[in-house]
Structure formats: structure tokens, C-alpha cells
């Protein structure tokens, strides 16, 4: 009976996700599109947050453990800085957006999804073709401009793409470091984010939702580049904070 009930929940969950998207994200995207990136984020951000909460609480029934360890001052101020996170699943997006609404760098395939791609663009997401060197270089320049002008905030997954094998984040030697190096050079604060359990929410083969999964997120306070002797030490420390947060969540949730 439990298996039958879980199966019956599938159409309800996806229908709810679609209806909520049409009601919240689509209108906000249309309204915000004519404005600059900062204004678009201001307009659409609350709607992305509401939609993400619906995805987690209603559509997936996820049991979320969240810890925001940023200082009270950082929480009150605009979301400036580079936010880095490990990446396991598409569910990472609503999990992060439930707490911080900052446009990420996304792979180009996302922008080809009807309607969703338009809304991602309207919300200020940057597109990258990981297989194209010119695209990677262009996106890096746009990301650097994003961090130093106007919005001054960006969300990025240094692993480059979600982990398809296993659940452990990549080690430091296998992540993309260009933006971390830029953050050190320009003294931009870096906020480490750790996530756990999102990989198990959606079955990658069937597309079925595994309702009621335990998932977690820890948002740590910023690392200040001025406290480090060189870029290598700084970048290693930033990613180590992500790894330690992931391990902490794993221990708490299992």
C-alpha cells in the first residue's frame, strides 16, 4: 500500500510544481525582464524563494535541515560575494534558493528547456557551454564583471557539474578555481555552502520523486581573502569548508 501511495503522489507532485511555476515564476520573469540584472533579481527573488519552498515542502515532502551561520550583519546586508557549493542534483537549486536568491552559472542545456530557460535568463543566470573554450572564457569574464559591478554577487558550483557517481564532493584538485582566484585577487568575500541528500530526492532513471527524504544545507560565514597569505591557501580553505560542512550534514542526517 505504501508503494502504491508513493506512486499515486507522482502526478500530484509534478502537477503542483508546474502550477506553482506558472503562478509565481513566469509572471515575475515577464515583469522583471526589461530591467537590469540587479533590479531583475530584486523583483524575481522573492518569487523564486516561494517557488523553491513549494517544491521542497509540498512536491517532494523533503525534510530539510538548514543552518545559516552567516553573521547577523551579513544576513541584513545585500547578498554580496561569491557563493560556492557542492552539486549533486537539480534539487540543489530550490534548496539554495529557499535561503539565498542569487543568479548562478548554469549549463547551456538548462536554457533550452521551454519557458524555464527564459525564466532562468530573466532571473540573471549566466550560461556556459562547458565543451566550448570560447564560451567558458566569455562566461568567466561575465562572472568577473558580475562580482565587481552592479549586483556584486554570484552563485557557482566549482565542481563544474553535479556528481553523477557517489555522493562525496570532489576533492580540491578536481574543482574549477578561476573564480576563487579572482575573488582572492579582488578581495571578494567567499561564502561556502554545503548540501547533502539532494541526490536521493529524484530517481535519475525513472524521474520518480522519492518523497520525504532528509536533505540538508549549511551556509557558512564568508572567508576574507585578506586573512590569507596567498591565493592557494585561500582557495583550499574555501573548498575545505564546503567539504567539512558536507561531512557534518552526513553525520547529522544519517
Image (tube, rainbow, N blue to C red):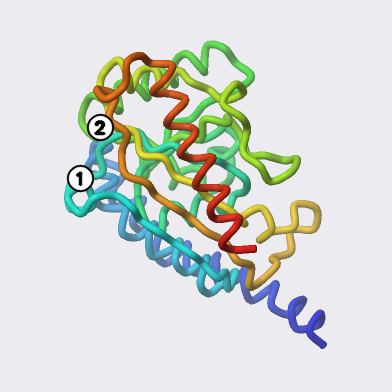
Is 242 on the left or on the right of 223, as rendered?
A: right
Above or below: residue 78 compared with residue 232 = below
Which residue is label 2 attached to? 152
The image quarter in which residue 130 lies: top right
Between the residue at mark 2 and the residue at mark 1, the CA separation in whole angstroms equals 9 Å
> Residue 73's spot in the image, x, y percent?
17, 50
Which residue is label 1 attached to? 78
Above or below: residue 47 compared with residue 116 = below
Is 143 on the left or on the right of 36, as rendered?
A: right
> Residue 174's spot in the image, x, y percent?
62, 23
> Residue 30's spot in the image, x, y percent?
34, 51
- Between 117 and 248, the residue placed more toward the observer is 248
Give the position of the C terminus as an image quadrant: bottom right
Give whichever of discs 2 and 1 has the lower sequence position: 1
Q: Callout 2: helix, strand or loop?
A: loop
Q: What's the residue at 29%, 46% (across, down)?
A: 41
Give the position of the N terminus as an image quadrant: bottom right
Q: What's the residue at 52%, 59% (across, down)?
A: 216
Residue 197 is tagged as: none
Amino acid at each position: 500500500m505504501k508503494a502504491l501511495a508513493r506512486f499515486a503522489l507522482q502526478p500530484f507532485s509534478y502537477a503542483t510544481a508546474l502550477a506553482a511555476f506558472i503562478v509565481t515564476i513566469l509572471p515575475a520573469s515577464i515583469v522583471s525582464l526589461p530591467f537590469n540584472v540587479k533590479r531583475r533579481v530584486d523583483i524575481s527573488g522573492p518569487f523564486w524563494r516561494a517557488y523553491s519552498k513549494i517544491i521542497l515542502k509540498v512536491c517532494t515532502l523533503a525534510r530539510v535541515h538548514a543552518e545559516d551561520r552567516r553573521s547577523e550583519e551579513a544576513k541584513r546586508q545585500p547578498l554580496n560575494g561569491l557563493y560556492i557549493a557542492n552539486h549533486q542534483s537539480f534539487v540543489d537549486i530550490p534548496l539554495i534558493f529557499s535561503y539565498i536568491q542569487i543568479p548562478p552559472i548554469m549549463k547551456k542545456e538548462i536554457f533550452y528547456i521551454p519557458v524555464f530557460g527564459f525564466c532562468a535568463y530573466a532571473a540573471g543566470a549566466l550560461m556556459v557551454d562547458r565543451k566550448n573554450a570560447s564560451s567558458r572564457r566569455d562566461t568567466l569574464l561575465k562572472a568577473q564583471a558580475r562580482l565587481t559591478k552592479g549586483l556584486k554577487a554570484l552563485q557557482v558550483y566549482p565542481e563544474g557539474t553535479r556528481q553523477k557517481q557517489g555522493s562525496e564532493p570532489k576533492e580540491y584538485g578536481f574543482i574549477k578555481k578561476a573564480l576563487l582566484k579572482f575573488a582572492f585577487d579582488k578581495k571578494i568575500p567567499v561564502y561556502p555552502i554545503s548540501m547533502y541528500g539532494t541526490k536521493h530526492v529524484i530517481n535519475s532513471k525513472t524521474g520518480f520523486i522519492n518523497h520525504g527524504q532528509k536533505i540538508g544545507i549549511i551556509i557558512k560565514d564568508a572567508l576574507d581573502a585578506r586573512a590569507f597569505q596567498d591565493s592557494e591557501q585561500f582557495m583550499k580553505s574555501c573548498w575545505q569548508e564546503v567539504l567539512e560542512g558536507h561531512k557534518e550534514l552526513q553525520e547529522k542526517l544519517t
